[in-house]
């Protein structure tokens, strides 16, 4: 049996999405900016796709949603534009992010730091959550931007973006949220709270890879990162990714349609699966379920290296993760586990299971059996597990059974 439980890394393309994209490769392949029928053949698809993307987050007509190549580009764009406009010019000197943002935020912030920007990396607490007061305490009159993700890719922790947005409005600070892990898992409506910029990416909600977007609230438009032609209103040059726009449109429409299912059925399957996993002795989950996206479990198995568990799972046809895919080629501890201050012996033991609306109960039943067998096998050969002292200080709330 093959089981895909790595949906926070990427997702299967919804076959309906693929079907809608297909004509835009071999039939309707014109450059939308050309002056002939090959071009105009693409226009209805682009228009419909863009309308669906706007509707998917409830952007107003006057707001801008700009299509990019990925969320990484959208995130780079926001931080670098703010740097050019506010920091380089000396108007402000500071941006604030959380210490568990995606590398496309962290690495960009570090780069800007090397150019003289002051950066605050907000800590998360032992539950993997952010406290709004720490945001408040770190804002100064020189703060240009606060950028906090909506939901964390590793734990699924949902951050209080509504309160942070309100605080930013009150203090006159721009607010960006990386909503990559929120779309299709939580209701995302940019009119319901103060948000100036919002990043999302099609391949995380059953759309194609290589298509991202950035929402910019009316009046808060950024200077371009990619200069060139006048595509996307001049905000982002480069020949339009026609099939990508069509695909992202269909994907976000389907994701919003499936949101109820995700928040009830998927959540229930996740909860039951998690209950079963936690029956295994010495297992730990960081963030309380109610404060998590419905599809994600980050669980530690004491005494078992995450990579060893992945090996056993992979041999049984199961794809999971030790954390973000970007970091999985080096054997560093999971960054969230480090950030919450997990003890060294647990920091390397986290496994992330991320479900989707395509996940079945049968797949989870099978996975549970494989995990149970892997735990017995791997703890049997673990040098650290047998010698773990009783009442060992884990840094995490315990789920002993
Ligand atoms: N932000 C978050 C929270 C993510 O989980 C990811 C996915 O890896 C990204 C950004 C980057 O997305 P993309 O692959 O579209 O660049």
Image (cartoon, rainbow, N blue to C red):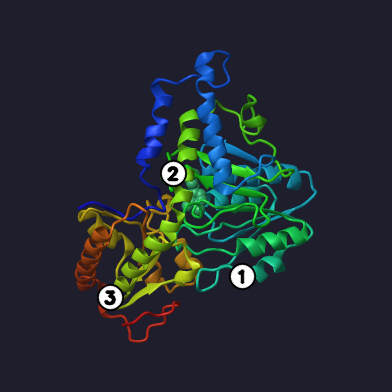
Q: Earlier in the sequence, mark 3 or mark 1?
A: 1
Q: Quadrant of residue 285?
A: bottom left
Q: Is mark 2 within 8 Å of ligand 1?
A: yes
Q: Is residue 292 left or right of residue 198?
A: left
Please tell me which residue is depicted at 75% across the width and 46% down the height of the picture.
86
Q: Is residue 39 above or below residue 73?
A: above
Quadrant of the image containing the C terminus: bottom left
What is the secondary structure assignment of the residue under circle 2? helix
* Numbered label attached to residue 203: 2
Q: CA distance from mark 3 to mark 1?
A: 31 Å
Looking at the picture, how far across and down is residue 160, in whole percent? 60, 64
Q: Quadrant of residue 140?
A: bottom right
Looking at the picture, how far across and down is residue 75, in whole percent? 58, 46
Q: Is residue 2 above or below residue 152?
A: above
**Dots 2 and 3: beta carbons under 8 Å?**
no
Q: Earlier in the sequence, mark 2 or mark 1?
A: 1
* Numbered label attached to residue 122: none
Q: Is residue 306 left or right of residue 35?
A: left
What is the secondary structure assignment of the residue under circle 1? loop
Please tell me which residue is depicted at 51% across the width and 23% down the height of the picture.
42
Q: CA distance from mark 2 to mark 3?
A: 33 Å
45 or 285: nearer the eye?
45
Q: CA distance from mark 2 to mark 1?
A: 30 Å
Can you see residue 41? yes
308 or 29: nearer the eye?
29
Can you see residue 302? no
Task: Name the front one of labels 2 and 3.
Answer: 2
* Numbered label attached to residue 280: 3
* Pointer 1 residue: 131
Task: Name the front one of labels 2 and 1.
Answer: 2
Q: In this view, which residue lies farthest toward the top?
A: 36
């Amino acid at each position: 049996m093959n089981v895909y439980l790595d949906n926070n890394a990427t997702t299967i393309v919804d076959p309906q999405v693929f079907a809608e994209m297909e004509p835009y490769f071999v039939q309707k392949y014109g450059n939308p900016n050309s002056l002939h029928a090959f071009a105009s053949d693409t226009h209805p698809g682009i228009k419909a796709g863009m309308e669906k993307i706007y509707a998917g987050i409830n952007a107003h007509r006057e707001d801008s949603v700009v299509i990019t190549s990925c969320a990484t580009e959208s995130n780079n764009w926001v931080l670098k534009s703010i740097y050019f406009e506010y920091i380089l010019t000396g108007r402000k000197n500071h941006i604030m992010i959380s210490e568990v943002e995606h590398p496309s935020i962290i690495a960009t912030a570090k780069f800007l730091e090397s150019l003289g920007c002051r950066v605050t990396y907000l800590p998360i607490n032992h539950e993997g959550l952010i406290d709004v007061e720490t945001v408040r305490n770190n804002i100064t009159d020189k703060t240009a931007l606060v950028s906090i993700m909506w939901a964390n890719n590793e734990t699924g922790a949902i951050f209080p973006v509504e309160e942070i947005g309100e605080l930013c409005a009150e203090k006159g600070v721009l607010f960006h949220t990386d909503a990559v892990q929120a779309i299709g898992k939580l209701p995302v409506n940019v009119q319901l709270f103060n948000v100036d910029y919002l990043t999302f990416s099609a391949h995380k909600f059953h759309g194609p890879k290589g298509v991202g977007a950035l929402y910019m609230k009316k009046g808060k438009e950024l200077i371009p990162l990619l200069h060139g032609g006048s595509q996307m209103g001049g905000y982002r040059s480069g020949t339009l990714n026609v099939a990508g726009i069509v695909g992202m449109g269909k994907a976000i429409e389907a994701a919003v349609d499936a949101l109820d299912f995700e928040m009830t059925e998927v959540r229930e399957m996740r909860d039951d699966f998690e209950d079963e996993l936690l029956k295994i002795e010495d297992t730990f989950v960081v963030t309380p379920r109610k404060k998590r996206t419905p599809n994600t479990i980050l669980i530690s198995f004491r005494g078992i290296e995450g990579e060893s568990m992945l090996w056993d799972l992979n041999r049984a046809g199961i794809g999971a993760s030790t954390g973000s895919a970007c970091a999985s080629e080096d054997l560093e501890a999971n960054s969230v586990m480090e950030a919450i201050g997990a003890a060294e012996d647990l920091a390397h033991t986290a496994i992330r299971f991320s479900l989707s609306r395509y996940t079945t109960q049968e797949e989870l039943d099978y996975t549970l059996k494989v995990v149970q067998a892997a735990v017995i096998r791997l703890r049997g050969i673990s040098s650290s597990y047998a010698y773990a002292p009783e009442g060992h200080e884990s840094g995490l709330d315990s789920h002993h059974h």
